[in-house]
Amino acid sequence: MLKRILIANRGEIALRILRSCREAGVEPVAAYSAEDLDALHVQLADQSVCIGPARAADSYLNQTALLTAALATGCDGVHPGYGCLSETADFDGACAHAGLPFIGPSEDGIRRAGAKSAARSLMREAGVPVTPGSDGPVRSEAEARAAAEQTGYPVMLKASAGGGGRGIRRCEKPSDLSAALAEAKAEARACFGDDEMYLEKLVLRPRHIEVQVLADRFGNVVHLGDRDCSLQRRSQKLVEEAPAWGLSPELREKMGEAAVRAAKAVGYENAGTVEFLLDPDGEHFYFMEMNTRIQVEHGITELITGIDLVRQQLRIASGLPLDFAQQDVRCTGHAIECRINAENPAQNFRPCPGRADFLHLPGGPGVRVDTSLYSGCTLSPYYDSLAAKVMACAPTRLETIRKMRRCLEEFTLEGFQTTAELCYQLMHHAAFVRGGYATDCLDTHLPELLEFSRRLAESEGST
């Protein structure tokens, strides 16, 4: 096993990795920016090393600083978490060149899965269904128009190097294409330094279903069930649940098998997620992308399987085979995750970080909260707005919804606005409670959810 690793990340995922390292007998070393001197993962780590000033570009995205920190502290591995450099093939390669295992897929695996237009071709060859669209990247507006005409409007323009909902534009008709392409390319350049685009048929009102996979270097690949990530705003997820509600056993099996084929097609190793769009008919699904990292929402898969995904990542990176087979995976119960972001939904989800003057977290059987916040700490404006992930698990979906309602009633954070109230309203909304909602659910019902919250606040203020 690895003995000491550098956690090349921050916030709740850094703390999450640190805890699994401790339990696995691996010494965690925390990398931190000057802004994060008082961060919880820094305070709890065996060692910590400052890698630069507050700006992410000068610290958590600074490959040289991270590698120097890892080597200086005698680490024998690097865990990138999610975000930051987790899907950066060059950093993976640099770690390998320095003799430091990258706790994730290989450099080639990241490139094969991360180049989304090329990944579509690989999926076709592997027998994984893909949405109709361009055969490869569209290198000009003329190529984009030709592909759109052949596919049929509406279409989606997507960045080949994209992720997290960035570099994506919806195009309803030919007259929209020029502006949509220019906007998507500009956002892709700003976010990923690469403006290569591809085009897909827009599947109207789909569900967003993803399948968790694990793969070792010996060719063993398993899936750990599915998650529904359809409750999202502008491709940014807010609520996830596992397993996805209402899938037939046959469809669930097909999606799991397709995810395994997808991982094998790219020669994948370590933890990853294969994402699909499910047609409104509930029968046809299409490969969307593969995320070559651990996901934000991995915790709900852990709750229903009992498998520590970070612990498995450490095993795989140590050169060990998976210690279980597909037939050993059992999904029990239902789990829901609510992302609590430091954002004001009533002001177009404006980020509003600040000092956590008081924090109280829910607890009890089947409750898990992943956060790096504590009373008196500051959520920095320099980084992501994610403040906490509240997770609940119970034998049935309805029991889990009720448990999550109770958790959100208990969750108290004074000091800045969050999405907790919005998540609470969603837990009561008929569209969610009935299940089977589509990706347009939150955007469709947001005005009424916000209006209800406004009236509730006014009522409470008058009493």
Image (cartoon, helix red, strand yellow):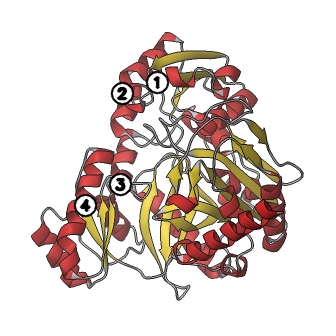
Callout 2 amino acid: Ala
Spatial separation of the CA atoms under disc 3 and disc 2: 21 Å
x 74%, y 62%: residue: 335
x 19%, y 81%: residue: 174
- Could you tell which of marks 4 and 2 lies nearer the N-terminus? 2
Q: Between residues 39 and 102, which one lies in front from this camera angle?
A: 39
Callout 1 amino acid: Leu
According to the picture, the residue beneath numbered tag 4 turns out to be: 183
Secondary structure under tag 4 reads helix
Residue 320 rendering spot, x and y as whole percentages: 60, 36
Q: Between residues 214 and 367, which one lies in front from this camera angle?
A: 367
Question: Which quadrant would the C terminus be assigned to in this image?
Answer: bottom right
Spatial separation of the CA atoms under disc 1 and disc 4: 38 Å
Q: Quadrant of residue 248?
A: bottom right
Q: Which mark is residue 100?
A: 1
Secondary structure under tag 3 reads loop
Spatial separation of the CA atoms under disc 1 and disc 3: 26 Å
- Could you tell which of marks 1 and 3 lies nearer the N-terminus? 1
Foreground mark, 3 or 2, reads 3
- Could you tell which of marks 3 and 2 lies nearer the N-terminus? 2
Foreground mark, 4 or 2, reads 4
Label 2 CA crowd tier, 10 Å (few <14, some 14–19, many 20+): some
x 16%, y 76%: residue: 145
Residue 1 rendering spot, x and y as whole percentages: 63, 27
According to the picture, the residue beneath numbered tag 3 turns out to be: 162
Label 3 CA crowd tier, 10 Å (few <14, some 14–19, many 20+): many
Given contact means CB atoms under 8 Å apart, are the residues at marks 1 and 3 in contact?
no
Spatial separation of the CA atoms under disc 2 and disc 1: 9 Å
